Image: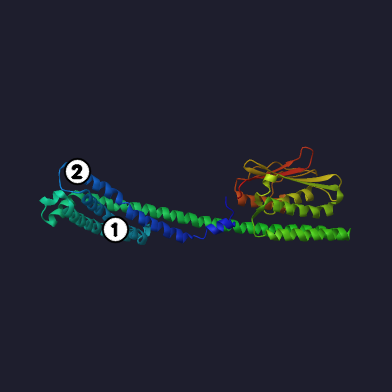
Amino acid sequence: MLTPSSPSLLAATTITIADEGVRLRRLTRTLFALVWLVPGILAGILAWTVAREQQLPLSLGAALTWQIARWSLWAVWSQVVLTLVERVPLSADRLGRWLAVHLVTWPGVVLANVVLVGWLDWQFAPWADGVPRFVDAVRLTSQRHLDFDVIMYWALLGAAYLIEYIRRYRERDRVALALEQQLARQQLEALRMQLNPHFLFNALNSVTELMEVDVRRAQRALSAVSDLLRLSLRSATQPTVPLWQEIELVELYLQVARVRFGDGLVTDIEVDPGAVDLEVPSFLLQPLLENALKHGLQPEGAGQSVVVHAQRQGGMLQLRVTDNGRGLDGGVTDSGRFLAARPSVNGLGIGLANTRARLALLYGDRYAFRLSKGPSGGCTVEIRLPVGGV
């Protein structure tokens, strides 16, 4: 699924909906002009074969010229019909005008076709020697082909309207898709605007607390926060980033956390080398780490650990954040759903709620989000994303 604001999608939308409609109309007119060559050629070969069997003087070239010219008349009439379809739409409020236009047009088209086909038959048909007058040739043609011409006009009109309705359906579908993508893009931007200040406030609060305890440690923390914000701003306009770039942000975030939590916090980052270039949503792992540090662990506690694990498993990328803290009183999630003891989005905190909302917008139901208790306590947050991006 393409990201609503991805560069590849923006490049693909250089062809507008109006341009697509014009292209389809031109293609339709071209096909309706050329398709008559097929029955014309077949009819020419058949006429030449019949003439040879009856030993009548008709060459293959003359037979093809005769029949292709006959059928090519419908190439002209089809352009008339297509013009009427574009200018006189079929709708309930204009049904009277539509009927009036076609009840006037089809007799004129049929009459003109009979006259021209009669002239062609009079000129080329080897059995026309017994028809000395042009009027007699037209009368004979009308007797043989008038009903066929009437059916052809209305069949052609039906085919033209079918293609027109397909074009309109595609146009409405493209408009709806464009609106949906615009809405998703706005929602993603709103979520990012919510997440970045949230993280900034938490980080600055941590530095403020350290200023009263250890100024030097607070300065180191403030420097780490500065580097972290610089890195986050670098990808501010990117909905997805390579995994290695997200890991850089995680390392900086853990530097800030270690200053606050002290030497009692042990962190470990395990990344599959085959997964470092895979695309992930930016700022995906930081809210998971924040959840572990804020709700699972205690500052200055001993023997605390947070492990970040990233591994490619077939067509999926598995991301996991595990802590050995207090654990949780919730349940397990399925793709697109969260089951908790208190099933409130607000209860998840801004970070986790924001993360799940972004995953739903980017991946639909193609992602998995699992929040579970560890076998020996603590909490594990696991996310599975399809390889190949959004």
Under mark 1, the amino acid is: Val
Identify the secondary structure beneath mark 2: helix
Task: Residue at 61%, 51% (x, y): give it.
Answer: 362
Q: Position of residue 230 (x, y in %)?
A: 73, 61
**Helix, strand or loop status at disc 1:** helix
Q: Residues within 10 Å of mark 2 (few under 14, many from 20)?
A: few
Toward the right, the furthest residue is 213
Q: Quadrant of residue 92?
A: bottom left
User: Which sits earlier in the primary sequence, circle 1 or circle 2?
Assistant: 2
Left or right for 146, reference 84: left
Residue 172 shown left or right of residue 317 in the figure: left
Residue position marked by numbered label 1 in the rendering: 76
| Residue 50 tag number | 2
Which residue is most to the top?
Answer: 375
In this rendered view, identify the residue nearer to me: 121 or 294. Answer: 121
Q: Which quarter of the picture shows residue 221?
A: bottom right
> x%, y% of residue 240?
64, 54
Res. 300 in view: no
Q: Between 131 and 181, which is closer to the camera in this rendering? A: 131
> Which amino acid does the dot numbered 2 rest on?
Val
Name the disc covering residue 109, or none: none
x, y percent for residue 84: 33, 60
Q: Nearer the viewer, residue 210 or 49?
A: 49
Residue drawn at 48 percent across, 54 percent down:
173
Camera-side residue: 173 or 38? 38
Measured from the top left, where is residue 211 in percent x and y?
A: 86, 61
The answer to whether the residue labelled 1 contacts the one labelled 2, judged by CB atoms less than 8 Å apart, is no
Residue at 41% from the left image edge and 56% from the top image edge: 24
